[in-house]
Image: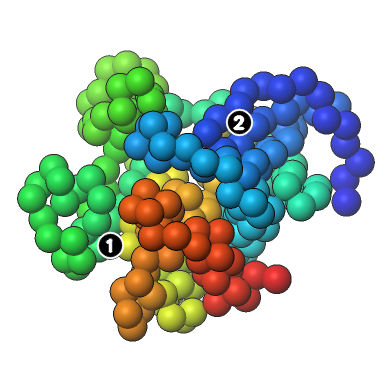
Amino acid sequence: MTKIEKGDLVNSGKAKSLYKTSDPDLYILHYRDDTSAFDGEKKESLEGKGKTNNKFNAFIMQELEKQGVATHFNELLSETDSLVKKLKMIPVECVVRNIAAGSICKRLGLKEGLELNPPTFEFFYKDDDLHDPMINDFHIISFKWATENEITQMKEKTFQVNEILKRLFANAGMILVDYKLEFGSYKGDLLLGDEFTPDGCRVWDSETREKLDKDRFRQDLGDVVESYKLIAERLGIT
């Protein structure tokens, strides 16, 4: 394990905090038990969520690395802390949807559960105050959030992740319904940043289509952390 000293707080989001370290190229990502929905309007602390998501993200990032997707993840430091590369983040979310659920149903009047073939891809601007509005390539280039090359890479990498993770979840008896990814630059390379946990994706049981992700919190279905742990167990995360 890397010997590293935790420094000043860089920023604190809805469920994670980011800290400087004694290495200027590395940050510590701390997972808290906090959870929120509807742009922070609904909040709660769920015991064990930080530990579960930290371990879950580490597993997914390492699986992606094995199959050629470069990420910012370095290593687990503790139950709630991970060491990650310091990225210059692009303020855009990349969303892939394999099944219609959530906001796309409201926007387009779709029935939840509709299979999307091919999967859809959407960009959203990261801004809670604006409720993360949907944007397109032209917005990103006009406002200089990313270059054309970076846009191309984000799309390619997001679909590459989809092929890897759809198989991974399917083999564990689950459907990867949709998810969001964020990217940032590190010494000239575009890397997958932020996290991949049940907070930022939708996962259903393949047989029953029971919701196993943060929709359990959004929709007051209960057993949120227990469900996150169930996903982890099915994937072989120990």
**Image label count:** 2
Q: Residue at x 71, y 22 (%)?
A: 9
Q: Residue at x 27, y 17 (%)?
A: 142
At mark 1, the secondary structure is strand
- The residue at which mark 1 appears reads as 98
Judge by depth and name the residue closer to the eye, 163 or 110.
Answer: 110
Quadrant in the picture for residue 161: bottom left
- Outermost residue toward the right? 3
Compared to residue 146, the image places residue 119 above or below, namely below
Quadrant in the picture for residue 58: bottom right
Relative side of 202 to 12, left or right:
left
Compared to residue 128, the image places residue 154 above or below, namely below
Q: Percent position (x, y) of residue 5?
A: 88, 32
Q: Percent position (x, y) of residue 207?
A: 33, 83
Alpha carbon separation for disc pair 2 and 1: 28 Å
- Outermost residue toward the top? 143
Judge by depth and name the residue closer to the eye, 58 or 152.
Answer: 58
Q: Residue at x 26, y 29 (%)?
A: 133
Q: Quadrant of the C terminus?
A: bottom right
Amino acid type of the residue that numbered disc 1 sits on in the rendered structure: Asn
Amino acid type of the residue that numbered disc 2 sits on in the rendered structure: Leu
Relative side of 203 to 66, left or right:
left
Q: Percent position (x, y) of residue 157?
A: 43, 50
Judge by depth and name the residue closer to the eye, 188 or 70.
Answer: 70
Q: Percent position (x, y) of residue 164?
A: 46, 66
Q: Is residue 141 visible?
A: no
Quadrant in the picture for residue 213: bottom left
Mark 2 Cα-neighbour bin, 10 Å: few <14, some 14–19, many ≥20: many
Residue 87, numbered label: 2
Report if the CB atoms under discs 2 and 1 are less than 8 Å apart. Answer: no
